[in-house]
Image (cartoon, helix red, strand yellow):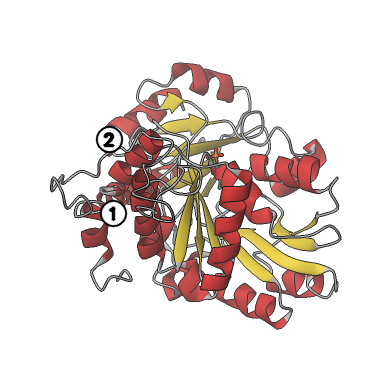
Amino acid sequence: MSRDGKKLATTLAQAGSRRDARTGAVSVPIHQTACFNHPALGQSTGFDYSRTSNPTRLALEETLALADGGCRAFAFASGLAAIDSTLRLFRTGDRLVVTEDLYGGTFRLFDKIFGPLGIEAIYVDTTHLESVRQALKDPRVRGVFIETPTNPLLRIADIRAIATLAREHQALMIVDNTFLTPVLQRPLEQGADLVVYSASKYLAGHNDVVAGAVVASTPELADRMAFCQNAIGAILGPQDSWLTLRGMKTLPLRLARQQENATRLAAWLSRHPRVPAVHYPGLPDHPGRSILDREHAGYGAMIAFEVDDPARVPHILAGVKTFLFAESLGGVESLITYPAVQTHADLDPAVRERLGIHNRLLRLSVGIEDVEDLMADLEALL
Ligand SMILES: *Cc1c(COP(=O)(O)O)cnc(C)c1O
């Protein structure tokens, strides 16, 4: 159920459709304008300058807020721009407890930008509650930033339990929900304060736009995020806001098909003699599955798997005919990625090895194609 009293699929299908009373345009217009004509001194149409607010971006932001059950949402130029603006809520000397197998770009942001400014990440295994509890004992901790499922190993953290711990320590709880989206996982309902997205992935869903979002749970946090969005200015433009909103209309349908394909592909891979390990949260023996089942979350459509011999990797990446060898995820087209050299190159090699992001690991973002073609593609190369 989304906050307007309708089911999420209904809200999303009609996103932006009743906003233009003058013409009745069913698709929200792209307001490609920097500024807005004021009727008179001291009067405003509600829009002044597009950095502060733009009607097309607002249609997307209101949809994002409804979808996650948040108070307000904010659209940014990329997922990293969204995370950057969120981390500006912290001050020099603050620390955050952060998922250790983090998306490489978010790690780089903490490591190279916020660390030197005195806002430090304490990396822990956030699938292990006791580690989170220990890390929170540091009195300088003001925030918790988790990714779940993690990238690329699809490990699952207990959002509800971590949110309870964060609240006890008055730490702001931020969840990167890029992999499961509000359709399959609802962090704000499980106690998180803020949700961040790379909307470039499932939300937009067609590998055609780079965008980011933040959803705030309370008016107080919304005001602070609105201030950061306007003061920093890393906003999403009207064209890309429209594309993202258009993508979100079909999010539940796309994800259902993607998850169905991923479930079949993961089961098939886990029986394959050349594949010693498959990481997919929907597999019955996946250690995080019970958490997702308890929260009525889904398993998503990301799979990581190991091949028996690293020499096979270049052959697979050069030979795929249905999968595309490209480094993103979440779109309708299935992609294959080599995390150790692509998405996670910024991690220390020793850390990569310890986390299991080694040279035999491949990651699949499963799209909406016919799953038989996807299987045949991998079968021919394995
Ligand atoms: C891609 C990604 C990001 C960064 O988003 P961009 O839109 O590429 O800036 C952040 N978190 C996760 C989990 C991602 O997959």
Identify the residue shown where x is 23% and y is 53%.
19
Identify the residue shown where x is 37% and y is 20%.
321
| Mark nearer the N terminus (2 vs 1) | 1
Q: Residues within 10 Å of mark 1 (few under 14, many from 20)?
A: many
Q: Is the CB of mark 2 within 8 Å of ligand 1?
A: no
Visible in this render: residue 169? Answer: yes
Visible in this render: residue 148? Answer: no
Which residue is farthest bottom?
168
Query: What residue did someone put label 2 on?
Result: 369
Pick the front one: 84 or 338:
84
Asked which secondary structure carries label 2, the reply is loop
Above or below: residue 167 compared with residue 37:
below
Above or below: residue 286 compared with residue 153:
below
Tell me the tag on residue 382. none
- Direction from residue 97 to residue 59 in the image, left or right: left
Q: Residues within 10 Å of mark 2 (few under 14, many from 20)?
A: some
